[in-house]
Image (tube, grey):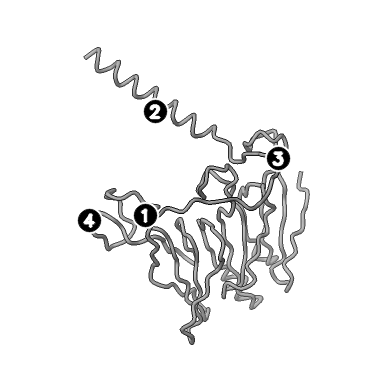
Amino acid sequence: MKKLHIALLGITVLFLASCKEDSEKPKVTYDGSNKEKTTVKTDAASIAIADLPIQMQGTDYLIHPVGDLSIREKGIKTRYGSSSVNDLSFTISNYGENEITGFLQNLKFQRIDSDSIKALTDKPVLIQTATYLKSVSDRTKNQIMVYTMVDMDTNKDGKLDTGDIKALYISQISGDKFTKISPSFQELIDWNLIESKNCLYFRTVEDTNKNGQFDKMDVVHYNYIDLSKKEWKVISYEPV
């Protein structure tokens, strides 16, 4: 019994050490160039797949979520959808009220009266959330989508994942006018829609001490966009 306790203790220590090591991995690796363009490795065994299309209420567009089966571990019995074969889920996204979530490679848009399908972007990205701002759209007639995603391999490990910096984007419901609104190399903290002002507020943190991590020694930036305007202009403000 004593040996078993020692073995379990050893496993626990190794697990905690592994968790600590993962948490201490820098989100940004500096090489002096600080360029946005990075090389992302492609997995030859990956299989691209699309979920069935989604239509946000009151819009004229279908949205096709596109992802990679290799993102989910094969053989795991946790299912995100109702259909699976050999314990492998073929559902790559989840849909809640006006929001698509997942780890998606792209979104494709199709007007309901057309067979043409257009990709949101032609660059490597990892889309985590895509939210339709219905309340603003109903009042201003500007049908807008907001996205949180990874768009750069900031830790330079050759892949896009949650270990990289998260960015904030917006677009029209058609996928047109796809625009990055958070500064590059600043981590998105959160965003919030203030419906009474038709304004999208968001916070980012800048790695000002250049240690590759985002911590209390870094600077938080506060910004908003007036979504009722035709031009999406990021305006900074200082609440503290």
Q: Is residue 96 above or below residue 151?
A: below
Left or right: residue 8 compared with residue 68: left
Residue placed under numbered mark 4 in the picture: 86
Residue placed under numbered mark 2 in the picture: 15
Q: Nearer the viewer, mark 4 or mark 2?
A: 4
Q: Nearer the viewer, mark 3 or mark 2?
A: 3
Q: Position of residue 33 (x, y in %)?
A: 70, 44
Q: Report crowding for label 2: few under 14, some 14 to 19, many 20 or more residues within 10 A (C-alpha).
A: few
Q: CA distance from mark 1 to mark 3?
A: 33 Å
User: Which numbered disc flags the more N-terminal residue, 4 or 2?
Assistant: 2
Q: CA distance from mark 1 to mark 2?
A: 29 Å
Residue placed under numbered mark 3 in the picture: 32
Q: CA distance from mark 4 to mark 2?
A: 30 Å
Q: Amino acid at mark 4?
A: Asn
Q: Amino acid at mark 1?
A: Ala
Q: CA distance from mark 3 to mark 2?
A: 34 Å
Residue ranking furthest to the bottom: 113
Residue ID at (72%, 54%): 223
Judge by depth and name the residue closer to the eye, 225 or 186: 186
- Give the SS element for disc 4: loop
User: Which numbered disc flags the more N-terminal residue, 1 or 3?
Assistant: 3
Residue placed under numbered mark 1 in the picture: 45
Q: Nearer the viewer, mark 1 or mark 4?
A: 1
User: Which numbered disc flags the more N-terminal residue, 1 or 2?
Assistant: 2
Question: Which quadrant of the view contains residue 134?
Answer: bottom right
